[in-house]
């Protein structure tokens, strides 16, 4: 009697060594392992795998969920892609739109999509890599360094403080009117958008209130000019 098949109005049950090994009831089919807390069941909800009372997997309505030691640690696969959760926190998503890897919380992550790669720390974007353009941010969205095919631009609180492009370095003050330009010829200094000094290969020139008042030093010596008149 320890090994038997019982058929009744509910369905069928199979026992070996007086232990239930399988049941085929109206509600569904269940196959048991070495005890009644380890089993696989198939019913209208789908398929569920349980090991020593811990659910390790469910397969239902096109969604596959694989569990670790608890429901807080799982991998979910459905028609949009895959999500990995640990400690009840989403750690990784591989969805149709792209892949996102999370840090210690949902606001710290790196995402890779058709738009490129984005790095976010505590809801603040730290860097983007998209279409050959690299942008690294400081403490806010208006302070950043940008590198693209034109070169590199440094911006501080919406004010451009430097550009590096095609062998020319330009360093700015409070505005683009106050700047130092360094290139293959040498260096030029502007204030209020007026040239004040130049140090080129040919020599050095210091300007007064306009471009026609200056002192220049070259291999030919020193020349002083006041309003276009050599003095």
Image: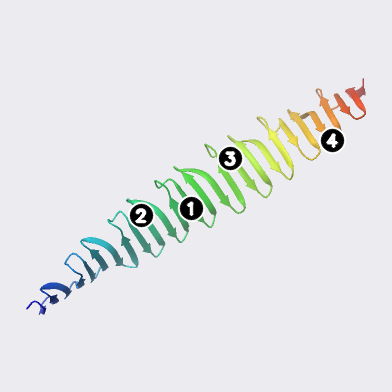
Q: Position of residue 229 (x, y in %)?
A: 92, 23
Residue neighbourhood size for the residue with mark 3, other residues' Cα within 10 Å, grouped as few (<14), some (14–19), many (≥20): many
Is 141 located above or below residue 76 in the figure? above
Query: Marks 4 and 1: which is nearer the front?
Result: 4
Q: Position of residue 163 (x, y in %)?
A: 68, 40
Q: Which mark is residue 111?
A: 1
Q: Earlier in the sequence, mark 4 or mark 1?
A: 1
Residue 196, by quadrant, is top right
Is 125 located above or below residue 65 in the figure? above
Q: Secondary structure at mark 4?
A: loop
Q: Secondary structure at mark 3?
A: strand
C-alpha distance separating marks 4 and 2 = 64 Å
Q: Earlier in the sequence, mark 2 or mark 3?
A: 2
Q: Secondary structure at mark 2?
A: strand
C-alpha distance separating marks 2 and 3 = 33 Å
Q: Earlier in the sequence, mark 1 or mark 2?
A: 2
Q: Earlier in the sequence, mark 4 or mark 2?
A: 2
Q: Position of residue 102 (x, y in %)?
A: 42, 50
Residue 230 visible within the image: yes
Q: Which mark is residue 49?
A: none
Q: Which residue is mark 4?
A: 201
C-alpha distance separating marks 1 and 3 = 19 Å
Q: Position of residue 168 (x, y in %)?
A: 74, 41
Image check: 133 left or right of 105? right
C-alpha distance separating marks 4 and 1 = 49 Å
Q: Which residue is mark 2?
A: 85
Between 55 and 25, the one nearer to me in the picture: 55
Residue 53, by quadrant, is bottom left
Q: Which residue is mark 3?
A: 144
């Amino acid at each position: 009697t320890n090994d038997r098949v019982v058929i009744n109005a509910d369905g069928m049950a199979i026992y070996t060594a007086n232990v239930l090994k399988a049941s085929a009831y109206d509600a569904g089919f269940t196959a048991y392992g070495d005890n009644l807390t380890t089993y696989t069941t198939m019913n209208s909800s789908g398929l569920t795998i349980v090991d020593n009372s811990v659910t390790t997997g469910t397969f239902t309505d096109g969604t596959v969920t694989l569990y670790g030691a608890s429901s807080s640690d799982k991998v979910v696969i459905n028609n949009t892609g895959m999500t990995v959760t640990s400690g009840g926190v989403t750690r990784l998503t591989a969805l149709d739109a792209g892949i996102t890897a999370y840090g210690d919380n949902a606001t710290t992550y790196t995402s890779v999509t058709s738009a490129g790669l984005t790095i976010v720390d505590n809801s603040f974007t730290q860097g983007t890599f998209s279409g050959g353009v690299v942008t690294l941010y400081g403490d806010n969205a208006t302070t950043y360094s940008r590198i693209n095919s034109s070169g590199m631009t440094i911006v501080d609180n919406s004010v451009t403080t430097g550009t590096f492009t095609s062998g020319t370095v330009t360093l700015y003050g409070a505005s683009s009117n106050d700047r130092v330009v360094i290139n293959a010829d040498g260096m030029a200094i502007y204030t209020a958008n007026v040239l004040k000094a130049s140090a080129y290969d040919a020599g050095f020139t210091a300007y007064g209130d306009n471009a026609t008042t200056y002192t220049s030093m070259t291999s030919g010596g020193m020349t002083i000019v006041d309003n276009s008149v050599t003095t």
